[in-house]
Amino acid sequence: MTQLIKTAALSVDFDRDLRALQAHGALAAMVQPFFKMANQRLADEKPAQVRLKDIVISTWLPPIPSGPFKRLIINEAREAIGRPVPQTVSIEVTRQCGARCDHCLIREGEGELSHDEILRIIDEALQMGTCIITFTEGDPLLREDIFELISHVDPEKAVVNLFTPGLEMTVEKAVKLREAGLYNLIVGIYSTDPEEHDRVRGVPGAYAKAIEAIKIALDTGLMVTMSCHIKSGQVDRILELYDLAAKLGVQELSVWEGMPKAPEERLTQIEREKIIEIYRRINSSPVGPRLFANTYFEGQMLGCMAGRKWMHIGVDGSVRGCPYLKESMANVRCGSLEDAWKALRRSGKFNDFIRTCPAQDLFI
């Protein structure tokens, strides 16, 4: 039994053998809904990774036990009393990218956040209670200071994810990522067909480089998520991508609903139900990687997290509820991160529990 929190009002224990969280005290009722969901996941689904000192339920969540997971629990209690904080902050750190994807939202334009600006964002996010920080867009590995940015995040307060298309990975960079304290590397794979993946990326050989990046990262000891986007008519490829993920040995395959460019690309309700069925079937099996699906995680389980648990910082400092929402509510270059979060909350756009992605209509 590991004690995660011990105060006069709230104590939280984690039973590793039973894989269950238990809360006691006057404030226990506030976190029970979250604990019920977490305990159900631990009981019914395989974790992404079981390590000597902790268990990773999903690569998108902090490990149990850990300082960041303790903060996640506290954040859930804050949300229960109407004082939500951005548990996840994603930051676009560069426009530089070797890929030429048609769906890229930041290829046009100039400039990016400076080193000091990103350090300030990290500091202010941690002060607010953030427990997950993700560096993204276009390819963070092209920033020379990315290792310093990762190491600046206090590992007792937050875990760090990093997205890359996998075009710039080397053994040296993988070692530096591990030494800097990276929690999880996310590599996007659009298809098991190399030609189709290369076509999406707009670069010949992109598939081979992405696969090699995954192998290098795993060999270096990094935790790796293989990520994909699915539109209508593509649900069946999830199993093909899962077989590839299993063959590579990644810890999790992450399936996101792709942003449709035409009405016929929008997932139907039947397709969403099929994704959830695949999710449950794969995660009930003890073998193979875990499957993450935002159709379930941000649909049935938690609802859309944009502006509720998630704040996204654009490459120009603009503040949005998530990367796909186009409307900026503030800019971190003109004020604090806390003021930006308050602007998001005051907008009234992120108060409801929404089971589908509100950004999907914006791309049609």
Image (tube, helix red, strand yellow):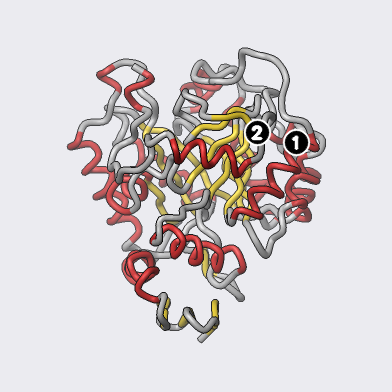
**Taking the image as drawn, is residue 71 in sight?**
yes
Q: Residues within 10 Å of mark 1 (few under 14, many from 20)?
A: some
Q: Position of residue 329 (x, y in %)?
A: 51, 29
Identify the residue at horizontal 68%, vertical 57% (top origin).
221
Residue topped by disc 2: 332
Q: Quadrant of residue 263?
A: top left
Front residue of this view, candidates 131 and 259: 131
Of the 4 image quadrants, the one containing the C terminus is top left
Tell me what residue is drawn at x 81 percent, y 35 percent: 144
Q: Check disc 2: other Cα within 10 Å, few if <14, some if 14-19, many if 20+.
A: many
Query: In x, y percent, where is residue 153?
Result: 72, 53
Position of 90 relative to 95 (above/below): below
Specify which label sits upstream in the sequence, 2 or 1. 1
Q: What amino acid does circle 1 point to?
A: Glu
Could you tell me which residue is drawn at 45 percent across and 41 percent down? 345
Compared with 139, 153 (above or below) is below
The answer to whether any part of residue 165 appears in the image is: no
Measure the alpha-carbon separation of dots 2 and 1.
8 Å
Is disc 2 in contact with disc 1, using a CB cutoff of under 8 Å? yes
Q: Which residue is mark 1?
A: 117
Front residue of 122 and 37 = 122
Q: Is residue 179 toward the left or the right of residue 93 in the image?
A: right
Mark toward the viewer: 2 or 1? 2
